[in-house]
Amino acid sequence: MTINDEILAIANQLANNGQKPTVALIKTRLSQSVPLPKIISVLKSWQHQPEFTEVENGSADSTELPRQEHIHAQISQAVEQAIQPLKNEIYELKALIQTLIDKQH
């Protein structure tokens, strides 16, 4: 759902509770920061729809979650590639240390 829909849903919630939707009241209830001119613009065109009070996050979440998982996978792969040379060097150092220990005995 768009930020416009969220603003409209909040305005309807306020009106349903007997409050006049104001920019300040709407701004405090928004899930993200929105410029005041945007709130004012949407509020000017708002018409009370008592049944439209819920902001559906399903569509945004369903597209955002795979994107986040993809980014997480990319980061994990990049980290693994970055530390692989270090792992190899540690393995070589351990082998050298073991060789030195074996020579002392």
Image (cartoon, helix red, strand yellow):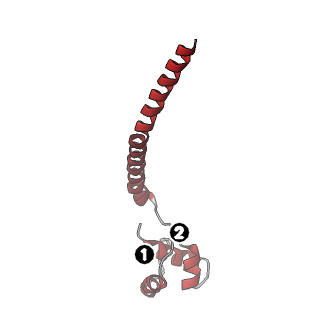
Quadrant where the C terminus sits is top right
Residue 15 visible in the shown view: no
Element marked by disc 2: loop
35 relative position to 21: left or right: left
Front of the two marks 2 and 1: 2
The Cα atoms of the two marked residues, 2 and 1, are separated by: 12 Å
Image coords of residue 9 (percent x, y): 49, 73
Element marked by disc 1: helix
Compare residues 64 and 76 and report the one nearer the observer: 76
Residue 30 visible in the shown view: yes
Above/below status of 44 relative to 77: below
Type of amino acid under label 2: Ser
The circle drawn on residue 4 is: 1
* Sequence-first tag of 2 and 1: 1
- Residue wearing tag 2: 31
Image coords of residue 68 (percent x, y): 42, 52
Residue found at x 41% / y 66%: 1
Residue found at x 48% / y 66%: 55
Residue found at x 46% / y 61%: 57
